[in-house]
Image (cartoon, rainbow, N blue to C red):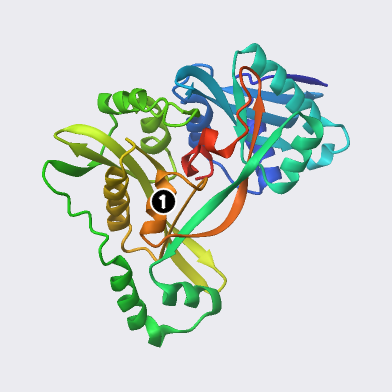
Amino acid sequence: MTIRFYQKGDEENIQALYMKVFKKDRSLSHWEWKYINHPESMNPFVLVFEEEGKILGHIALWVADAYIEGEKAKIGLRVDTMVDSDARGKGIYGKLNQRMLEEAKNANINYLYGFPAPKAKELLMKYTNAIDVENISRYMTILDPITIGAGMIGGQSLLKPIGEIYKKLKLKGTRPNLSGDWELVEVGQAGARFDKLAEDLRTFKPIMLKRDANYLNWRFKQHPDKTYTILALLHKDELKGYIVVKIEKTPLKKGAATIGYIVDWLGYEDEKIWEYLLKGAINHLKDTDMIQSWFFPENTATNVLSKYGFKEKDRPMALVIHQLEGRTMSNKQDWWVTQGDVDSF
């Protein structure tokens, strides 16, 4: 048995393991986007556990450029940790995680972070020096409660006009109505202005991804399966912030609902900028039944979300980190993370 880095040609076995573990079919184009096409040259950063020519375990990182206290650094998002169910009892999960920590440290990656499910979190805390930062808050506003209710319990078609009236009232006051030299535009491809924004906001939080043009284009414009919209806020042709949204049809117990997601969001520290961006997002998502996103509380984004009717629903996802170099940043206010940090969004 051996643990080694990914080699070209492993794709077929990795895909088969993914299907066996997660019961989901993943296209080769999705795998290539996720691991081969990432703009940071250290990717793919993938380890496999191999025994008698068969891959029984897999662990990977998205290695990305980041800012730590304003200085450029590397951080890695843990993704797709999986072990063949027929190989349990061999300690593969713990061995893969320990080896990944060693390899990441050798590669001068400062932090690993991720959002593990409860069982995976339990194992991480057991087998590694993981730090549980806190669970992230999910914020939600319901635009059409009748459609949501019908999807949950069925019926209610006669009440549909009430849902439409409710939505109109809910959306009142949320049109952007930009004044003066302000402009909100949809972005086809992020360009140099996004590089400047990322550099200017390098101290927005003590630790955050470098959300430059290369990263944003790869993450949101080149995704093979999902469609995202990037809205950019300009003032006198200068980029002041952006917000990324997507729309998905989500099955419910008795039907389905159309959900709008605020996936990523960043701007200069001016509440007017964040209000303009949120209003633009709501306007773009106005035909959905519900809008949701998540952030750690007590920052500009959540203050503006609360102002426009978003409520904290729950705290479904834990941020768990490994500090490999430098000062330990285990306070939730140290981190700027959005849904876009999670590969499944």
| In the image, farthest residue toward the left | 180
Residue 162: x %, y % from top left: 35, 82
Residue at the image position 47 percent from the left and 40 percent from the top: 340
Q: How many marks?
A: 1
Above or below for 286 versus 198: below
Residue 210: x %, y % from top left: 43, 26
| In the image, farthest residue toward the bottom | 158
Residue 187, located in which quarter of the rendered image?
top left
Residue 47, located in which quarter of the rendered image?
top right
The residue type indicated by label 1 comes to: Asn
Q: Answer with left or right where residue 2 lies relative to residue 305.
A: right
Work out whether residue 34 or residue 65 is closer to the camera in this orientation and state it: 65
Above or below for 28 versus 8: below
| In the image, farthest residue toward the right | 89
Residue 305: x %, y % from top left: 40, 54
Residue at the image position 44 percent from the left and 50 percent from the top: 302
Q: Name the residue under label 1.
A: 303
Q: Quadrant of the N terminus?
A: top right
User: Mark 1: which secondary structure?
Assistant: helix
Q: Is residue 79 visible?
A: yes
Q: Answer with left or right where residue 232 lies relative to residue 88.
A: left
Above or below for 247 versus 80: below
Estimate how packed mark 1 is, as few (under 14), some (14 to 19) or many (20 or more) residues with alpha carbons within 10 Å: some
Residue at the image position 48 percent from the left and 35 percent from the top: 29
Residue at the image position 34 percent from the left and 76 percent from the top: 166
Residue 228: x %, y % from top left: 37, 45
Q: Answer with left or right where residue 233 lies relative to residue 150.
A: left
Q: Is residue 78 visible?
A: no
